[in-house]
Structure formats: structure tokens, C-alpha cells
Image (tube, grey):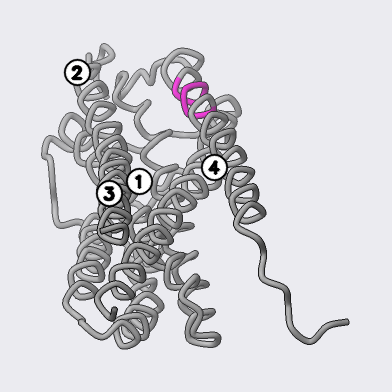
Amino acid sequence: MPATTPDTTAYLLLALTLFFVILLAFVGTLAIRVRNLHKDDLLLDQLAED
Amino acid sequence: MSAVQPMPSVAQTQAESAARTRVLTALTAITVISILFGLYLALFAIGEDTTQGNVQRIFYLHVSSFAGAFVAFGATVFAAIAYLRTRSAKWDGLAIAGVEVGLVLGLMNLVTGATWARPIWNTWWTWDPRLTADAIMCLTYFAYLMLRQGIENIETRRRFASVYGILAFSTAVITLIITRIRPDTIHPIVIGPSPANAEGGFSLDLNMGTVLSYNMVVWSVLVPWVLIWWRIRLENLSQRVQARRAHMLEQ
């Protein structure tokens, strides 16, 4: 058992960063996929009008 | 009573969709606030672990994200069984949403575990039974997404994905219980007695248990629910666009 508490704050910050980067990346891909589908939908609207 | 159900009007459908969007938006806001409050509790309300230092605080998210992944993969099993019984596309939408959300939460669990292990075990990774099972679980669900893309026929794809989704859940169950059935693991057990070889364990006092319970509820109920709901909406939109495209090609 160490005599003093080790300073492991940097690992905590790294873990938190990775944790939320993965979460936000997934949310970002959802947003991008929705935007692309809306674009496709608009394109189909235009093709239907032509 | 009429035998034929009347078709809902476009305005009615749009009003229902707008109401659902409002509910989902409110639920998303509640979830974000709950995540931030859980983070505050884990980082500031609880004292520092004297043996491990601040890195121990990550376990509130590490354990909770695995619980969330387990719930999401469980939703896939439920949806897969429902799809095989009814052949309704909506269940397939829930199944793939569960896999994507579960995989994301599983990866979050994996990276936080590896980062905790570096100062505590002096290594980023070791082929411990729990870590190996966790990695196999993530790879199995990653393969689900890859293999799904490779099947052209939509009915075959959904049927295959349903069976795969049910079988793949065994990897999540094994990951959950392996620390209790393999005595050679060094992975500590947070709830209950740790194995004899466990390194980096700690006893859970009342305050820690409360913060963990709060985060468990947030990450295993609110987060999977909200993410799966958004993913289902994406799937519904995708199916509508594909149906329109197919309809136009037929003309």
C-alpha cells in the first residue's frame, strides 16, 4: 500500500475525455446520417417535380 | 365497428410526430442534465480514494456504461424475438438501434477500463478473462453490423440479424458473470466480494453506493432509451427514403 495517495488525475481526465469523445462521435454520426437522408428526401422531391 | 381501420390524415400523422419529437427532446434534455449531475457527484461530491487516487472516480462511469450496454443488447434480444414472431420491420429497427447503442456504451466501458488499468495494474491491457470477454463482446457486435451490411435481400438480412442478435447476447452475459466463475481474474468486483487475485479493488461505502446507483440509473435507463429512440427515428427515416427511391425507380 503506498504511503501517500498517488496523483492519477491525468488518467482520470484521459478516461473522461475518451468516454465523452466516443459518445459525442456517435451522436455526431446520427446527426450526419439524418442530415444526409433529409438531403436525399429533398432530392427525391425535386426529381418527382421534374 | 368498421372492419377497415381509417387511414390517419397527413395532418394527424404530422401532429403525432411533432408530439413525439417534443417528448424525445424533453427526455434528451433531462438525460443531459442527469449525466452532468452524475458527473458532478462522481468528481466533486465523493472523496478521493487514498490508495488509487482520482482515477478511481472513473468506475462510476465504467460500471454504469457496461450496465447501459447490457440493457441495449437486451433490447436487441427482445426486438429480435419480436421480429421473428411478427416479421414487422419496426422490431428490426429496434434491434439494430440496440446493437449500435450497446456497442458505443461497450466501447466507452472498455476504454475507461484500460485507462484505469494503466496506473493501477501498470498496463493498458492484459488478457484477463473479464477484459478478454469484454473485447470479444464488442467484436461480436461489431461483426453484427458488418455482416448485416453484406446481405442484399432485406428479409434474409433481418432474419439473420435477429438470430445473430439473440446468440450474440451470450457474450454480454459471459462478460457479466465471468469474474464470478473464473478464480484467476484480477478484475475487481465492485458489488460483492472480489476474487482472491483481484488487484485494484475497493470497498463500497454508503455514499459511493448512492453515487454509483444514481449513475447506474442514468446510464442504464435514460441514456440507452434516448439514444435508441433517436436511432429508431433515423432507421424509420432511412426506410421511408429507401421506399420512395424504390417507388420512383419502378415508375
Find disc 4 in the rendering and name its residue. B222
Residue B94 placement (x, y as % from top left): 46, 65
Residue B61 placement (x, y as % from top left): 40, 35
Q: Nearer the viewer, mark 4 or mark 2?
A: 4
Find disc 1 in the rendering and name its residue. B188
Q: Identify the residue at image location x=32%, y=48%.
A: A38
Structural distance between the alpha carbons of marks 4 and 2: 29 Å
Q: Which mark is residue A10?
A: 2
Structural distance between the alpha carbons of marks 1 and 2: 22 Å
Q: For the residues labelled 4 and 2, say whether their Cβ atoms are less than 8 Å apart.
A: no
Q: Is residue B37 magenta?
A: yes
Residue B13 against residue B89 in the figure, above or below: above
Badge 4: chain ID: B
The stretch of residues the image draws in magenta is B34-39
Secondary element under disc 3, as helix, strand or loop, is helix
Q: Earlier in the sequence, mark 1 or mark 4?
A: 1
Question: Dot 4, how many residues are within 10 Å of its Cα: few (below 14), some (14-19), or many (20+)?
Answer: many
Badge 2: chain ID: A
Amino acid at pointer 2:
Ala
Amino acid at pointer 1:
Pro
| Circles 4 and 3 on the same chain | no
Total marks placed? 4
Amino acid at pointer 3:
Arg
Structural distance between the alpha carbons of marks 1 and 3: 39 Å
Structural distance between the alpha carbons of marks 3 and 2: 34 Å
Q: Which mark is residue A33?
A: 3
Image-based side of B90 in relation to B198, left or right: right
